[in-house]
Image (cartoon, helix red, strand yellow):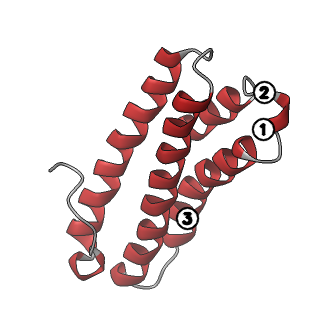
Amino acid sequence: MDHTVKVYEFTASLPAEEKYNLASQLRRSAASVPLNIAEGSGAATNVEFGRFLGYAYRSLKEGITALELCLRLYPSLRRDSIASLIDEGNQISRMIHSFIQKIAPTESRWPDPNS
């Protein structure tokens, strides 16, 4: 959840013309991560939970890509704060991937983020 809050705070620094574009997309992808994890935690099986973790994983990767786009489009923004969000997102994605491997290995069809 902390990562999501940080992304929301970061999007406030984006130019006004991005309010309904990149900022909105970043917020939705960031919010999707904890929401899918929470929804999946109520699943009846580990395979079903793994599926929701997969949604969270993909949303996180989407958000990381959007942050990388911010680095390219808006060089005047604080690069260190964007890089920090990207690093944190990559760290969380590795944790989610590991969790999926442990509880529902058949659901993990993505490349290992550690390689």
User: Label 2 amino acid?
Assistant: Pro
Vertical relation: 101 (above or below) 97? below
Nearer the observer: mark 1 or 3; the answer is 1
Residue 7 place in picture, x, y as percent: 61, 35
Apparent side of residue 1 relative to residue 57 in the rendered image (left or right): right
**Quadrant of res 18:** top right
- Nearer-N-terminus badge (3/2): 2
Residue beneath disc 3: 36
Apparent side of residue 94 relative to residue 114 in the rendered image (left or right): right
Q: Which is nearer the eye, 57 or 72?
A: 72
Apparent side of residue 80 relative to residue 21 in the rendered image (left or right): left
Residue beneath disc 1: 18
Q: How many marks?
A: 3
**Quadrant of res 34:** bottom right
Number of the label disc, if any, that sits on residue 15: 2
Labelled pair 1, 2 in contact (Cβ < 8 Å): yes
User: Label 1 amino acid?
Assistant: Glu
Residue 95 place in picture, x, y as percent: 30, 50
Which residue is pictured at 84% across the width and 35% down the height?
17
Counting other residues with Cα less than 10 Å from the Cα at mark 3, is it few (<14), some (14-19), or many (20 or more)?
Answer: some
Residue 51 place in picture, x, y as percent: 42, 77
Which residue is pictured at 26% across the width and 72% down the height?
103
